[in-house]
Image (cartoon, rainbow, N blue to C red):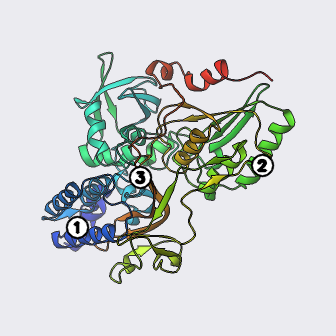
Amino acid sequence: MKKLFALILISLPMWCMAQKMIPATALQSDASLLWQSLNELHPGMYRHVDTTDLVSGYEKLLEEFSVDRTQEEAFKNFSEFVVKIKCGHTYLNPFNQPSKLIDSIIADPVLLPFSFRIIENKIIVDSSRTEKINSSAIIKCINDIPVATIIDSLSHYVKADGNRMAKKKKNLEVSFGSKYNYFDYYFPLIYGFRDSVSVELEDGDIVSVPLFDKKLRDSKGLGTISYDDMWSYTLEENYAYLKLGTFVTWKMTFDWESYLDNFFIELDRRKIKNLIIDIRDNEGGLTELTDYLTKKLAKNKGKLVPRRKYLAYRKVSDNLRPHLSTWSKWFYNVTLWTKKYDDHYRTPRFSKVEKTIKKNSKAYEGETFLLINEANSSATFILAENCKVNNYATLVGTETGGTKMGITGGQIFFLTLPNTKIEIDIPLIGSYPTTDLPDEGILPDISIPVTLNDFRLKIDSQLEYIIENLIVEN
């Protein structure tokens, strides 16, 4: 009998094995710990949302946890709750989840066998791994559910600063070059489709599309794109094009500063009068890179938008500390390097509010054009803002992510909930303007939206507009 029971266990798929139930009391205990952590540590807990709305969201979370749940269900519920804070650095980071939680969700055939973009609120296939559907196909419904409904429902689980719906849609796109895509794990969590789905195309055709597991889809792709491959440049007679697909420089194998030094030296040697910097689809990363590029473009003296940095705590409470991890012990007790600002916040001792940008006598002398879009929400948001405020570059593309109301980052605690083992990123420093600014991203000087027709024809209308209309001949 024991042997038979063991054989049954061995034969169960991973998805079934993952359905261990977590007691309601344990779930509510984790929720309480998260609530305490956010209220104690987060510098902008109620900046973008009304207090009563967030309290109501917490009460709903406790209600969801009034019965036993699986780890996957807890992941979904916690995701939905923290997104209500509307902070782009507060979320359930898939790369930090223990016990391979994300991998367990997508180990079964639940993944669409194609990558896609979301343009004009429609899903358009980018690259297909099945003969059932072609690249550039526009999807109208999945299992009779309109894609607009799917996008809207999944957006409630995806992070963004303020009310940047365009940023959420950008986050929901699927790229074969990414290890994890939000759509890949929230789609099966919310809808539960397995093995295959019925896909209705815009032309009226209905096809049955097989779903893949992660291993199968990866085997048919080109693999995850390396951070090194996200940087490139070309030097033409009349312009240079610099693609910076990430600011996560600590994961690169080369010296990013030497790379850019050599690039700008070559621009000067060839006397190229036009520079196109492309940061589209780049969420951010190292702020030192933002500072570097700002300096390289500072032909004239400039200024930063006045912002003060805020921290909400002095010292981490003893009951929280065992559940928090980070890269520096200085985050647990900030009294040595911060000072009291008011009854609620502290601020770094030597952090200036009014900051100027020195004129750089060795700055790039030509015309600079910065390609931006809704992905830019952290260090790239700041770069776009610096260039916009000081006329260091002409911004072309679409409104960025992030918000002028202020963003968080710089230092982060990784909170691991003891019962569900789910990890949540909590930023510790808020950078907020000294005057009231609207909840909007950085607007381009020249707005050029991406259209379905452009995508189908593989036309980069934003880049082409610069080349054909704005660059000055050498």
Q: Could you tell me which residue is drawn at 27 percent across and 68 percent down?
A: 35
Which quadrant of the view contains residue 97?
Answer: bottom left
Q: Crowding near pointer 3: few (<14 within 10 Å), some, many (20+)? A: many
Rendered location of residue 394, percent (x, y): 61, 32
The residue furthest right is 269
Q: Position of residue 289 (x, y in %)?
A: 64, 52
Q: Is residue 192 visible?
A: no
Query: Vertically, is 431 above or below 226?
Result: below
Q: Residue extending furthest top?
A: 203
Place residue 116 in its image quadrant: top left
Badge 1: residue crowd in 10 Å (few <14, some 14–19, many ≥20): few
Amino acid type of the residue that numbered disc 3 sits on in the rendered structure: Gly
Q: Position of residue 373 (x, y in %)?
A: 50, 36
Sooner in the amino-acid sequence: mark 1 or mark 3: 1
Mark linked to residue 125: none
Left or right of residue 29: residue 226: right
Q: Nearer the viewer, residue 366 or 206?
A: 366
Specify the label residue 4 is tagged with.
Answer: 1
Mark in the foreground, 2 or 1:
2
Disc nearer the start of the sequence (3/2): 3
The residue indicated by pointer 3 is 88
Residue holding disc 2: 261
Q: Name which residue lies at 13% across and 64% down.
A: 67
Numbered disc in front, either 1 or 3: 3
Q: Amino acid at mark 1?
A: Leu
Q: Front-most of 437 and 245?
A: 437
Report, in whole angstroms, how far the alpha carbon at label 3 lies from the one at label 2.
Answer: 31 Å
Residue 198 falls in image quadrant: top left
Which SS class for mark 1?
helix
Q: CA distance from mark 2 to mark 1?
A: 67 Å
Q: Are marks 2 and 1 in contact (CB under 8 Å)?
A: no
Q: Are marks 1 and 3 in contact (CB under 8 Å)?
A: no
